[in-house]
Image (cartoon, rainbow, N blue to C red):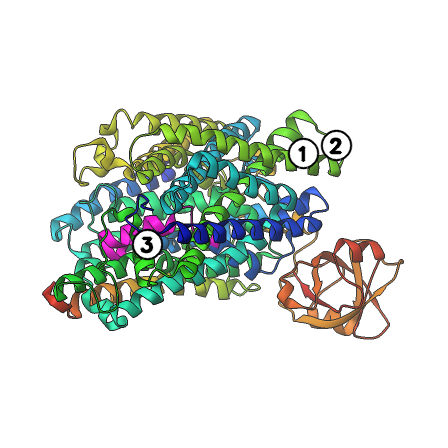
């Protein structure tokens, strides 16, 4: 059976591979569905109660960050331009200071439930709904695009028509996201992240082995393919200058600052200190490793082809590797270097489809959060019970999935490569809002009129640069090629510059140099220079206690109904080791650290008890709210 | 009133002039020009961020874990800069088999 990728896979092998994929989908859905029990309320459904240890969301971001067709796209890029395919994964550090000490603490401490909510609190309602429009466009675009590429990928791999595969995949995804919420998304993504690395590692190992070792791989790789940077300006679709502005700045800021899915992942973490651990791990470890996992087969393919050309035929023990369609580089190389082993190849393909699923589940959950917190709750049903909103959140997940499905029809009608459709869309949508977020968070004087003007006019002018690309020319004249396509990435630079000019000009023209008391009050805790206020508001008043204490474990829980709900009582010695004072926020978790905070939560220190040192006292309600189990010890950590 | 405008004009001028300066000193295909483009603009972005978090007191050295994270931030930047520079150097200087 010949599919569009140049592989000759027999009917029996297709059946085995197809069965592995279907089995994998069922396994993931059942696994995700199990976590429905950890979503008792709307906060659990979207934010998992802000209780997880850093490593759990960080590890689950592996699968989220590897997009729907990363293996195919980056292996193709790796084959065509070499190790520079890793650039998009390894240029994020420049924005980390802004995120780690700016945006992240702002959204974490202000307890905003969605990015548009931040816009209302920082500016006004108009700003919020302009932001809702742009962010929903961004996320629904991604959901539709990812579903579409799932269909393309599966059709290419096993020949099943996308007319059937896309709705079926959407049903599986929708099911576990709808019932399991954020906890299900995190745990399934964690599992899928491991599978992705194992499958990618397997394909890389097989490729290197076929070549005869790492020295052979490196030795046969041409210099152009060894370099970490591609030509500065030459390649219209992939050049270093465009990648810096489009990917390292606009793209990375959009992904980390504006992508509700990623923000929600950070908001599930127990403390800002742990959030920072997740950021560092993500940028320093996960992204570079992911760059290798998704792109290395393309680099290996280049070495294999070079070695084959030199020896004048196939390598000993292998079929000749011929890559007719570079989009299928990963599949061709994996199939041949795994010696056409159906089971191993089936596993690799199943894990590859995991990459497809794990980005969308995050986006569906994130879209549902915006639908509930920015549309349904403030505009449709304001004062309903938590159970009502939980039910509405599940319906919102279904609507987000269905809307994504409908958008697939639009994507299917577009012309051009998948990559060009993707970037042409994203580079128009993100620059204005990304810049507005930046100005709002880092410049206290930036006001509501300026924010709305910047988002609306910035977006319109960025959109106008599509029919009138000469607008971008002064910033990008050195990028080669006369056609409009050259400005795919540089459009982001233009959009960010023009939005900044609009935002700053309108601010200067509409405000006095000194902000009024009302303006100062409104921006309290919502800008980088008011983070102390944010921390104080977060802990319910008082000065944050920044003294670093110990984590105290192996404590037994005693139920005492005299302890107020959401507080605990510990011995003087434990409080001393924690460096905690009464009313400080303390994190209580099941002593088994591998649970990652699944059974945990934040409560406040009450008073000191005179009992045993290894005893912590809680009310039965608090015990239940923290998902703790009878007979299991707990660990305490002072947050601040 | 002038300060924000001056800051923007300075950044726009750098965005306009720096690539042209790089291209006039080396060809666009030179890997080191690529490196200087990315880490030049990258350094401007990164150290603007560092200045901002320090001047706004979002990061206060000596408070809680802030010093440790500040160290990670600066160390991370130089780690990537040195890592990429080493990578370019090895790519250009280790021999290629088959004379390609």
Instruction: Check the picture and name the quadrant holding the C terminus of chain B.
Output: bottom left
In this rendering, position of residue A623 left or right of residue A369:
right
Do tags 3 and 1 sit on the same chain? Answer: yes
Residue identifier under label 2: A384
Does the magenta portion include A90?
no
Work out whether mark 2 precedes mark 3 in sequence or the reverse, and give the earlier one.
3
Residue identifier under label 3: A330
Classed neighbour count for the residue bearing mark 3: other residues with Cα under 10 Å, few (<14), some (14–19), many (≥20): many
Residue identifier under label 1: A392
Name the residue nearer the viewer: A286 or B39: A286
Does the magenta portion include A82?
yes
Chain ID of residue with mark 2: A
Name the residue nearer the viewer: A377 or A82: A82
Residues at badges 1 and 2 in contact (C-beta under 8 Å)?
A: yes
Please state the extent of the stretch shown in magenta in the rendering. Answer: A63-87
Q: Residue at x 36, y 54 (%)?
A: A89
- Name the front one of labels 3 and 1: 3
């Amino acid at each position: 059976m010949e599919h569009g990728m140049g592989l000759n896979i027999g009917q029996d092998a297709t059946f085995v591979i197809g069965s592995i994929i279907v089995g994998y989908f069922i396994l993931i859905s059942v696994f995700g569905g199990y976590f429905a029990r950890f979503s008792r309320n709307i906060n659990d459904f979207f934010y998992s109660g802000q209780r997880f240890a850093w490593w759990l969301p960080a590890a689950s971001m592996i699968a989220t960050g590897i997009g729907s067709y990363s293996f195919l796209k980056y292996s193709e890029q790796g084959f065509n331009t070499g190790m520079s395919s890793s650039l998009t994964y390894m240029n994020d550090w420049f924005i980390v200071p802004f995120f780690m000490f700016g945006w992240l603490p702002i959204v974490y401490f202000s307890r905003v439930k969605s990015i548009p909510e931040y816009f209302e609190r920082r500016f006004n309602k108009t700003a919020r709904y302009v932001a809702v429009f742009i962010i929903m466009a961004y996320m629904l675009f991604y959901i539709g695009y990812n579903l579409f590429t799932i269909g393309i990928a599966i059709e290419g791999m096993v020949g099943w028509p996308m007319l059937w595969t896309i709705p079926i995949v959407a049903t599986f995804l929708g099911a576990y996201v709808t019932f399991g919420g954020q906890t299900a998304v995190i745990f399934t993504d964690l599992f899928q992240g491991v599978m992705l690395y194992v499958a990618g590692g397997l394909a890389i190992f097989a490729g290197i082995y076929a070549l005869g070792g790492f020295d052979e791989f490196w030795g046969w790789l041409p210099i152009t393919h060894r370099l970490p940077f591609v030509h500065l300006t030459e390649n219209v679709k992939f050049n270093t200058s465009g990648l810096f502005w489009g990917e390292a700045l606009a793209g990375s800021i959009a992904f980390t600052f504006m992508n509700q899915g990623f923000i929600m992942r950070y908001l599930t973490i127990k403390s800002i200190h742990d959030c920072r651990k997740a950021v560092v791990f993500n940028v320093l470890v996960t992204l570079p490793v992911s760059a290798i996992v998704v792109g290395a087969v393309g680099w290996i393919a280049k070495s294999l082809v070079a070695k084959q050309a030199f020896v004048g035929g196939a390598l000993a023990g292998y079929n000749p590797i011929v890559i007719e369609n570079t989009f299928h580089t990963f599949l061709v190389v994996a199939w041949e270097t795994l010696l056409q082993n159906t089971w191993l190849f089936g596993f690799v393909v199943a894990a590859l489809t995991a990459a497809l699923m794990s980005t969308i589940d995050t986006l569906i959950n994130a879209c549902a959060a915006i639908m509930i917190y920015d549309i349904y709750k403030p505009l449709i049903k304001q004062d309903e019970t938590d159970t009502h909103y939980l039910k509405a959140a599940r319906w919102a997940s279904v609507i987000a999935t269905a809307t994504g499905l409908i958008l697939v029809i639009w994507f299917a009608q577009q012309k051009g490569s998948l990559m060009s459709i993707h970037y042409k869309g994203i580079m128009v949508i993100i620059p204005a809002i990304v810049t507005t977020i930046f100005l709002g968070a880092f410049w206290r004087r930036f006001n509501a009129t300026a924010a709305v003007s910047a988002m609306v006019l910035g977006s319109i002018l960025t959109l106008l640069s599509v029919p009138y690309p000469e607008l971008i020319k002064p910033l990008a004249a050195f990028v080669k090629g006369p056609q409009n396509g050259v400005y795919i990435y540089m459009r982001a630079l233009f959009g960010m510059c023009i939005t900044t000019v609009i935002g700053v000009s309108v601010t200067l023209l509409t405000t006095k140099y000194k902000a009024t008391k009302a303006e100062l009050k409104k921006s309290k805790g919502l800008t980088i220079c008011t983070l102390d206020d944010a921390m104080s508001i977060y802990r319910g008043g008082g000065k944050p206690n920044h003294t670093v204490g110990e984590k105290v474990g192996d404590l037994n829980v005693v139920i005492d109904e005299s302890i107020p709900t959401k507080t605990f009582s510990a011995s003087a010695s434990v409080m001393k080791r924690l460096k905690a004072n009464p009313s400080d926020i303390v994190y209580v978790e099941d002593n088994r650290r591998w649970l990652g905070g699944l059974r945990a939560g934040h409560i406040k220190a009450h008073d000191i008890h005179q009992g045993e040192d290894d005893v912590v006292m809680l009310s039965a309600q608090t015990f239940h709210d923290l998902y703790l189990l009878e007979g299991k010890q707990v660990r305490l950590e002072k947050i601040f | 009133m002038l300060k924000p405008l001056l800051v923007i004009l300075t950044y726009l001028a750098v965005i306009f002039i720096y690539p042209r300066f790089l291209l006039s000193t080396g060809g666009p295909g030179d890997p080191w020009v690529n490196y200087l483009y990315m880490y030049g603009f990258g350094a401007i972005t990164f150290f603007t961020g560092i200045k901002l978090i320090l001047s706004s007191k979002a990061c206060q050295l000596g408070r809680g874990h802030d010093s440790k994270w500040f160290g990670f931030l600066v160390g991370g930047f130089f780690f990537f800069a040195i890592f990429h520079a080493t990578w370019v150097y090895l790519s250009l200087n280790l021999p290629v088999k088959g004379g390609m």
